[in-house]
Image (tube, rainbow, N blue to C red):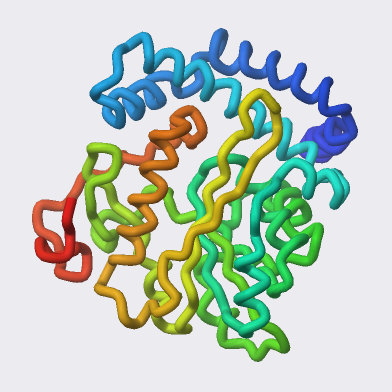
Amino acid sequence: MQKVLFALLNQVSFLSWKNAFRLSDFLCFVLFKVGGYRKKVIWENLKNSFPEKSDAELKCIAKDFYLHFTDLIVETIKFRTASPECVRERLRGDISIMDGFYAKKTNIIYLMGHRGNWELANLFSSLCFSHECIVVYRPLQNQASDRWFYDLRTRFGAILVPMDNIFKELQKPREKPYVVVLANDQSPNPKTAFWTKFLHQDTGVFRGVETIARRYNLTVLYADFCKVANKRGYYHVDVSVITETPKEVKNNEILDRQLRILEQNIINQPHNWLWSHRRWKHKRPECLKPEQTLSSAEQKR
């Protein structure tokens, strides 16, 4: 059965973009109008994140998100066989900063949130960066699904590394500078997370990014992927420097700086985030360890 499913997905990847988005329209109707996929989760996330907005405004954001979500599905299938030219056409932006760091032989950790199409972002990184591209991921339990995504993400030479193995991977000798690509806006273990306010809510954040950056002295960049207005399936990337001196910034400040940028990006284009994710399923512990916070002097929010 799985072989049939993935054979079908591979056939869908050869659809024209016009027909792919027709399929997305149909999936949107089935998933959300008929099936009501995670509509309660989406609504609660939006309601808590934008308390100043009316229900009518939130419903508009939710409706736009539904279509964005199914577009992500069909786009990801399309990128399984899309040409390098297609990847470059669908995601554009000024990445000259990467060339400058490459010339200085600077190793980088390249952060992103679940905005835009992160599978496209991964392909774009391995295709367009001069750095050796290391993509951090969490393996799927289903082996067939994991293999399908592995083949997708490594199409243009990226090295795919499970999060648990990233420290071992970065200890290997390399002939040229590398960039570690990862998204870190999922829901972490509350007992080890950095806790802060994000979109008006107590929010835990994975601390592994700071550990990696400090241990290997990596320049930290953040990339935002916004949707191009009135051009379905097209995205634009903006790259920000979080810090070039990770060992000198205060504890958790890298993560806090990233979250401030991500928060503003979401406010600017609210339907373009993964609202169906149970991002706030964990509650902030009553007692936090010092390494899980910013001191009141450091945190200005």
Left or right, 116 with respect to 265, comes to right
- Foreground: 235 or 152? 235
Left or right, 215 with respect to 190, comes to right
Location of residue 285 in the rendering, given as x and y in whole percent from the top left corner: 16, 52
Residue at 35% from the left image edge and 66% from the top image edge: 254
- The relative height of residue 232 versus residue 123 in the rendered view (above or below) is above
Marks counted in the figure total 0
Task: Pick the quarter of the image with the N terminus.
Answer: top right
- The relative height of residue 162 versus residue 75 in the rendered view (above or below) is below
- Foreground: 43 or 191? 43
Left or right, 120 with respect to 32, comes to right
Residue at 73% from the left image edge and 72% from the top image edge: 130
Location of residue 16 in the rendering, given as x and y in whole percent from the top left corner: 88, 27
Q: Quadrant of residue 78?
A: top right
Location of residue 131 in the rendering, given as x and y in whole percent from the top left corner: 69, 74
Location of residue 283 in the rendering, given as x and y in whole percent from the top left corner: 21, 44
Residue at 63% from the left image edge and 33% from the top image edge: 228
- The relative height of residue 222 versus residue 30 in the rendered view (above or below) is below
- Foreground: 183 or 285? 183
- The relative height of residue 2 versus residue 188 in the rendered view (above or below) is above
Residue at 72% from the left image edge and 35% from the top image edge: 75
- Foreground: 288 or 265? 265
